[in-house]
């Protein structure tokens, strides 16, 4: 289930929530990107 | 037509075992891999399939003098990697197992100490007896109480926290030794566990036993041997754990110092054994209430008849507000009434449909889905669903508990498997302990079914927001870390920040949204 479905908002609003989430916890975003990049590189 | 291949090229050639082994390994054909002729590892004593060729390295310890020498040798391993420890017992349940022997291994040396004078066949009895009945400690040691005497001599080594021990599922051996009478051994200094290491490397692997590990990491097929040749098993452990360049241990170590501490924590937990009441009155009350429902088979039969009556009968209409037209108020608009009537008709159709659908050749189905569909029309189906759930709870949680009481200790011993779930959760095996304070009365985890020994208390503990704490740590995010450090409700804190309001202005709805975002982020939820 997507965030918009779960908290019953539009996808745009959900997008906005996530954006502001990442603004207040910026390192979470960079951590997520790092993990994804690493997975792409190493395959695990 | 020119053919460059000649007959000889097509002749069947010998299998290239090295290449095949690689291929099998990559494709995870473990059975085939095991079937391949094992490669004798370089420098190993003898072929793995044969008996130990160097008797000096694998020996039984049968006199007090030998035991003292062993203890001294074990002490000497301190700071040099320590030794591996294994117990040979009569049961897979550590609290019910009788100790038959202990084995120790370091470098390439292995010793087996038989401690049970008359162990059952298949557990080293043949070998011990063959040596001459009762030679254990004959020369210089006591003839009786051998086990206690042996343990007392080993105790300083085993209980020394600075002397490193390696084990394969060492928790088992620790519990076995702790349960020994008259005085258990409190094994300390377990620094490494090959099973947990293997699981850390491959949490999704099916097995983490020595056979699988030695095959995977050492290309050695472990002998399935009897305890009287225990030395051989120890070689495998020793190779896995101590051999220089020993893949497993090095890789495992690099990956995991934490499991060792987790192990200690867990064993400590395992020692807090819930007591069990001796009187039946303390059994969860649902168990007794359940009796009022009558004999399961009878009730089930009755239940099976009921939906049949419901499907065919008219008598249910009165009990169902949607079944009578009186439910529709005359003051309503005509359209409304029409709609209501249609609704009523539809409800009837659904009921009829539900009833029809239950028919399966021989009779009416009473599976849960059908019963839930029938539930709106009569109280019985949902009662039946409840009853089944309670029966299940009773047979799963209530009935097994008294049987799980260890006669020796009068307690219930639950096992937490550290390597049971790929997600890293502990898997509870055996009787379920009372789980948490929120357990419903009479349901699983109802703490009234067990009680602590006098002077002890049952403790329930759980991680709080473990995923988000991990995220805070891994991402090293100052905001998240600060919220946790301040002991804030993380969802509330997130809501306040994301929605730009004060902490105490956060409504439950806002908190709910923040919670969804928090977990959504951790689990990679889409927009």
Image (cartoon, grey):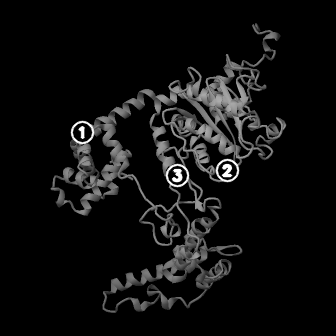
> Is the residue under label 2 in contact with that under label 1 (CB below 8 Å)?
no
Residue B343 visible to the viewer: yes
Mark 1 and mark 3: Cα distance apart in space? 41 Å
Q: Quadrant of residue B149?
A: top right
Residue B132 percent location from the top left of the image: 84, 37
Quick one: label 3, few (<14), some, or many (20+) residues within 10 Å?
some
Would you place residue B76 above or below residue B64 in this image?
A: above
**Mark 1 belongs to which subunit?**
A
Bin the neighbour count of mark 1 within 10 Å (Cα to Cα): few under 14, some 14-19, many 20 and up: some
Q: What is the secondary structure assignment of the residue under circle 2? A: loop
Name above or below for residue B324 compared with residue B303.
Answer: below
The label number, if any, that marks residue B97 in the structure image: 2
Q: Are marks 2 and 3 on the same chain?
A: yes
Residue hosting label 3:
B270
| Disc 2/disc 3 C-alpha distance (Å) | 16 Å
Q: Residue at x 36, y 53 (%)?
A: B464
Q: Quadrant of residue B505?
A: bottom left
Residue B26 relative to residue B6: left or right: left
């Amino acid at each position: 289930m997507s965030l918009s479905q779960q908290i019953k908002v539009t996808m745009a609003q959900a997008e906005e929530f996530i954006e502001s989430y990442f603004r207040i916890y910026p390192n979470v975003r960079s951590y997520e990107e790092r993990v994804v990049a690493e997975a792409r590189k190493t395959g695990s | 037509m020119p053919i460059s291949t000649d007959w000889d090229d097509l002749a069947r050639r010998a299998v290239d075992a090295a290449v095949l082994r690689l291929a099998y390994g990559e494709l995870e054909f473990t059975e085939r891999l095991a079937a391949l002729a094992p490669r004798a590892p370089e420098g190993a004593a003898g072929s793995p399939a044969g008996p130990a060729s160097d008797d000096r390295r694998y020996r039984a310890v049968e006199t007090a003098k030998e035991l003292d020498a062993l203890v001294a040798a074990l002490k000497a391993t301190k700071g040099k990697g320590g030794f591996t420890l294994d117990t040979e017992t009569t049961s897979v349940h550590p609290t019910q197992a009788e100790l038959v022997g202990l084995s120790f291994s370091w470098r390439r040396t292995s010793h087996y100490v038989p401690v049970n004078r008359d162990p059952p066949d298949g557990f080293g009895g043949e070998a011990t007896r063959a040596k001459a009945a009762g030679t254990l400690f004959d020369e210089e040691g006591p003839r009786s109480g051998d086990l206690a005497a042996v343990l007392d001599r080993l105790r300083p080594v085993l209980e020394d926290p600075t002397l490193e021990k390696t084990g394969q599922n060492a928790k088992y051996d620790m519990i076995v030794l702790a349960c020994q009478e008259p005085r258990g051994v409190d094994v300390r200094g377990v620094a490494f566990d090959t099973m947990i290491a293997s699981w850390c490397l491959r949490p999704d692997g099916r097995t983490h036993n020595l056979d699988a590990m030695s095959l995977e990491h050492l290309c050695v097929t472990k002998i399935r041997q009897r305890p009287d040749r225990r030395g051989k098993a120890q070689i495998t452990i020793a190779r896995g754990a101590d051999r220089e360049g020993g893949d497993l241990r090095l890789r495992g170590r690099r990956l995991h110092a934490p499991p060792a501490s987790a192990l200690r924590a867990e064993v400590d937990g395992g020692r807090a054994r819930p007591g069990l009441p001796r009187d039946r009155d303390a059994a969860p009350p649902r168990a007794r209430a359940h009796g009022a429902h009558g004999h399961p088979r009878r009730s089930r039969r009755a239940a099976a008849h009921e939906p049949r009556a419901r499907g065919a009968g008219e008598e249910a209409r009165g009990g169902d507000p949607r079944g009578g037209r009186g439910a529709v108020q005359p003051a309503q608009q005509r359209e409304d009434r029409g709609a209501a009537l249609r609704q009523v008709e539809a409800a009837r159709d659904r009921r009829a449909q539900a009833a029809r659908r239950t028919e399966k050749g021989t009779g009416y189905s009473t599976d849960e889905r059908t019963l839930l569909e029938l539930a709106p029309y009569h109280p019985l189906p949902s009662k039946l669903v409840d009853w089944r759930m309670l029966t299940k709870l009773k047979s799963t949680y209530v009935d097994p508990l008294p049987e799980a009481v260890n006669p020796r200790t009068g307690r219930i011993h639950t096992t937490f498997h550290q390597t049971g779930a790929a997600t890293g959760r502990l898997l509870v095996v055996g009787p379920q302990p009372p789980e948490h304070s929120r357990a419903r009365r009479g349901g699983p985890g109802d703490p009234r079914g067990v009680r602590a020994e006098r002077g002890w208390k049952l403790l329930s503990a759980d991680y709080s927001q473990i995923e988000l704490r991990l995220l805070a740590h891994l991402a090293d995010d100052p905001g998240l870390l600060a919220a946790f450090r301040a002991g804030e409700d993380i969802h509330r804190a997130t809501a306040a920040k994301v929605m730009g309001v004060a902490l105490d202005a956060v409504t439950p709805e806002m908190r709910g949204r923040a919670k969804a975002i928090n977990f959504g982020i951790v689990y990679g939820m889409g927009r």
